């Protein structure tokens, strides 16, 4: 029977994954406990990891993230188990008699120590170190969670509404209305009518403002890109990065090192390409610069020559747009705040 105990790893994994954005609740935790009680994931650490991937992960990205966290927590738990084994030796070894017991002496031997009186023990209070509760550690982790205007889970949910369905898939969907119409026309049933399966042909181009005043929002823009690329059913997702204004060149990576012409990026799409720009538009620092506005207006005019499906997401609250370049940009195209309602409105605008 295996000596592997999965329970010490379960709680730290559960709370760490919740903190990193996994959609885990009480029901997922109880289902996992029930599976472990039934013998699943109890052979070794790999068996437990395989069980958690099947129950707690909903994408390949989440499985890779769980792999890294699992290795980290397993490495932290290994020294603790060794220390526990050293402090608690097997009690059976203490109770096992010696293989060669010495025979009892027939004569009672008197030790010199017996001649001295036995001292009376003095009772005193000894300091005792209280154990650190795992619950206290987990509570501390929850206390340091930061406020987020929009969660990663809500982004995944919202991308489901960016659809452009075209019936060009396999012809295996039963068309009930066409089948009934054919029976009424022929007077008898000969064969069912099938229609083609619909597929999502949405094409999304994300233009992300990077560095500078957008640095505090890199976490949210990164989640926006990753959820669109890996956790949505959008057929094609392209990403371009820029600094302040998407000028003649944009960049393929967030470090702004791989240049690509904006003109060629736009030419790769068509009139049904959806474009979503994410930038503060100067609202973060309260700037109002005519040069930035005119450069942005020129780029927006160039984009509108290729597609009309364009919207702007601003991570700064709308009340801070007043008197900045963002207020003037909002007159050129629909601009929405980067919150759940604003993301829904932007997706409705570009679909």
Image: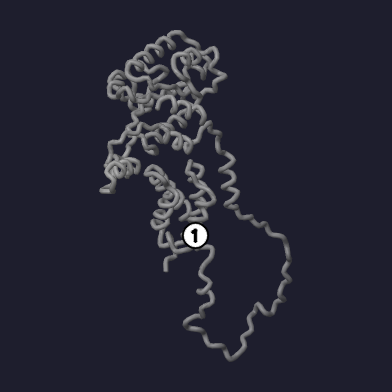
Expressed as whole percent of the image width and height from the top left, the position of residue 139 reads 59, 46
Asked if residue 82 is positioned above or below residue 61 in the image, the reply reads below
Expressed as whole percent of the image width and height from the top left, the position of residue 101 reads 51, 84
Q: Residue at x 51, y 74 (%)?
A: 92
Asked if residue 234 is positioned above or below residue 88 in the image, the reply reads above
- In the picture, the quarter occupied by the N terminus is bottom left
Query: Where, by quadrant of the figure, is residue 183 drawn?
Result: top left
Query: Where, by quadrant of the figure, is residue 232 drawn?
Result: top left
Task: Please state which of residues 28 and 17 is positioned toward the viewer in this rendering.
Answer: 28
Q: Residue at x 73, y 62 (%)?
A: 124
Q: Residue at x 49, y 60 (%)?
A: 34
Judge from the rendering whether residue 176 lies leftward or rightward of residue 211; answer left or right. Answer: left
Task: Please state which of residues 278 and 161 is positioned toward the viewer in this rendering.
Answer: 161
Pick out the residue farthest to the bottom: 106
Judge from the rendering whether residue 285 lies leftward or rightward of residue 242; answer left or right. Answer: right
Tell me the residue that label 1 is attached to: 34
């Amino acid at each position: 029977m295996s000596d592997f105990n999965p329970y010490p790893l379960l709680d730290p994994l559960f709370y760490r994954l919740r903190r990193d954005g996994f959609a885990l609740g009480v029901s997922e935790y109880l289902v996992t406990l029930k599976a472990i009680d039934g013998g699943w994931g109890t052979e070794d650490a790999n068996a437990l990891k395989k069980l958690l991937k099947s129950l707690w992960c909903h994408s390949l990205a989440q499985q890779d993230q769980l792999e890294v966290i699992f290795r980290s927590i397993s490495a932290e738990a290994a020294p603790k188990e060794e220390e526990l084994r050293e402090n608690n030796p097997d009690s059976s070894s203490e109770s096992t008699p010696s293989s060669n017991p010495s025979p009892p002496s027939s004569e009672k031997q008197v030790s010199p120590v017996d001649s001295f009186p036995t001292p009376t023990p003095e009772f005193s209070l000894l300091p005792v170190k209280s154990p650190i509760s795992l619950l206290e550690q987990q509570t501390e982790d929850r206390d340091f969670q930061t406020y987020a205007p929009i969660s990663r889970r809500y982004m995944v949910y919202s991308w489901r509404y960016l659809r452009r369905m075209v019936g060009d898939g396999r012809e295996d969907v039963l068309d009930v209305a066409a089948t009934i119409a054919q029976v009424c026309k022929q007077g008898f049933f000969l064969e069912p009518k099938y229609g083609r399966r619909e597929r999502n042909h949405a094409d999304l181009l994300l233009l992300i403002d990077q560095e500078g005043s957008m640095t505090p929002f890199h976490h949210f823009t990164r989640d926006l890109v990753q959820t669109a690329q890996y956790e949505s059913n959008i057929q094609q997702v392209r990403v371009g990065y820029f600094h302040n204004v998407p000028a003649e060149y944009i960049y393929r990576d967030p470090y702004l090192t791989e240049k690509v012409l904006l003109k060629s990026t736009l030419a790769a799409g068509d009139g049904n390409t959806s474009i979503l720009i994410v930038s503060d538009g100067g609202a973060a620092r309260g700037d109002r610069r005519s040069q930035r506005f005119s450069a942005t207006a020129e780029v927006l005019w160039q984009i509108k020559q290729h597609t009309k499906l364009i919207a702007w997401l601003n991570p700064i609250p709308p009340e801070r747009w007043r008197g900045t370049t963002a207020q003037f940009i909002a007159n050129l195209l629909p601009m929405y705040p980067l919150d759940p309602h604003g993301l829904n409105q932007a997706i409705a605008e570009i679909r």
